[in-house]
Image (spheres, rainbow, N blue to C red):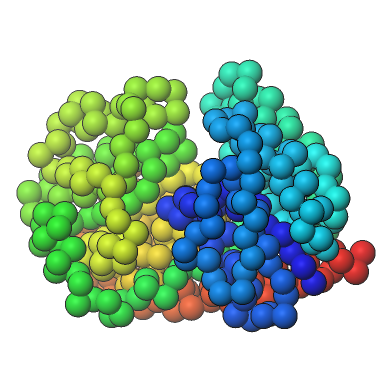
Amino acid sequence: MHVALNGWFWSQPYTGSGQVVRRLVAMLRRIAPEVRLTLVLPPGQPVPDDLPEGVQAVTTRGPGGNLGKVWFEQRTFPAAVAACGADLAHVPYWGPPLSSPVPLVTSVLDVIPLAIPEYSQGFGPRLYASLVRAAARGSAHILTLSEAAKADIVRLLDVPAESVTVTYLAADEAYHPKLGAERDEAVRAKYDLPDQFVLYLGGFDLRKQVNQLLLAYTYVGQAEGDQIPLVIAGKEPAWGTPIFPDLRTYAEELKISDYVRWIGPVDEADKPSLYRLADVFAYPSVYEGFGLPVLEAMACGTPVVANESSSIPEVAGDGAYLVREGDARAMAGAIIALLLQKPLRESLVNQGLARATHFSWRKTAKETLAVYERVLKG
C-alpha cells in the first residue's frame, strides 16, 4: 500500500491539523512500516528535517496566499499523487480536491464554517466552504474526531453515516503528571507564573467563549482573585472583530484586570508544565471537533472545568467538571469548589488520569489504517 498525504500543515505543528498529520504519520511508520508513505509538501517548503525515517517527501511549486492554497489542494496535490504512483490519497484536514486520480480519504476535523455562520462571512469564505463541502462528498471515506463531529458532518454535508469513521485524537506522551516535571519551576519562572492560578490555554475566537470564563472570574475573584489569578495563555489576535471580540476591554469592564494575567504564546515544549502548575484548567469552548486541551490537562493530572457542549462530554467523560454552556455562575462555582474542596479535587484528578488512558495515537493510527484498507478493497 502506498499512501500520499497532503502536507500543507506539516510546518504548522501548533495547529490542530498540523498535530494530526505529524502524529499520524509518525505512528503509521511505527505500526505499519510496510506501508509506503509520501508527504506532498506545499510550494516553497523544503523537505523537513524532522520527517520520520522512511517517509518520502515531494516538493512542489506554485503560487502563495489563499488562492495558492486552493490551487495546491485542487491541482498540485492531485498531480503529485498521480506522479508518485500512490494507491490512495489522504488529505488530513478539510481541504480535499474535487477530483483525485486515486481513492481519496479526507479528515474533516470539524465543520465550523457551516455550523457557526459567523465563520463563513464574506464571498471568499463562503465560496471556499462550498468548494470543500462538494469535495468532501466526493471522498471515498471521511475521518473525523468525535461522534459529535460525525453527527454534524452527516447533517451538514449530507453524507451517509457509514461513509464517516471516528478516529479519536490523543495526548502526547509528554502530557503526564510526573514525566518532565523537573522543568516545571523553570517554566514558572519563564512566564512569571504565580504560586497558584487558574489556567486558560487556547484560542480567542468566538466559539472559545473566553468571555464566559472572564465573567465567571468576577465571582471567583471576589473569593480568591488576589491569591489565585486567572492566567490566560495563547497568541492574542487583533481584537474587536466579529470573530475576535475584544476580551481585554471586556475584562476591564468587568473590573477583573487585577486578577487576570495575559502571558501570550506558550512554547509547545512548555505546555505540559503549564498544565501541571495550574490548580484548575478552565476550557469554556462551546464548539470543538475534539477538544484536545481538555485531554492534555487531564493527562497532566490537572482538574478540568469545561462546558457540557459539542464533543467535550464525549472526550472528558467523568474526568472533568462539566457545566451548562454559557452559565458563568456555574463555571465559577465549579472552579471555586475545585480550589477549596480537596477531596473533590483529588477525585477529579484521578478520574481525569483514568479517562486519558482511553486515548492513544497507536489506536488512532490502527483505525486509520483499517479505513485505508477498507477503501482500497472497495
Residue at the farthest left position: 226
Q: x, y percentage for residue 223?
A: 12, 50
Quarter of image, res 62? top right
Taking the image as shown, residue 202 lies to the left or right of residue 315, namely left
The relative height of residue 158 versus residue 179 in the rendered view (above or below) is: above
Front residue of this view, candidates 22 and 205: 22
Front residue of this view, candidates 1 and 17: 1
Taking the image as shown, residue 57 lies to the left or right of residue 15, namely right
Q: x, y percentage for residue 291?
A: 49, 55
Taking the image as shown, residue 36 lies to the left or right of residue 183, namely right
Q: Is residue 50 visible?
A: yes
Picture residue at 74% right of the left edge, 50% below the top: 80
Picture residue at 87% right of the left edge, 66% below the top: 376
Q: x, y percentage for residue 48?
A: 50, 59
Picture residue at 44% right of the left edge, 79% below the top: 354
The relative height of residue 238 versus residue 289 in the rendered view (above or below) is: above
Quarter of image, res 177? bottom left
In the rendered image, the quadrant that contains the C terminus is bottom right
Residue at the farthest right position: 378
The relative height of residue 349 versus residue 107 in the rendered view (above or below) is: below
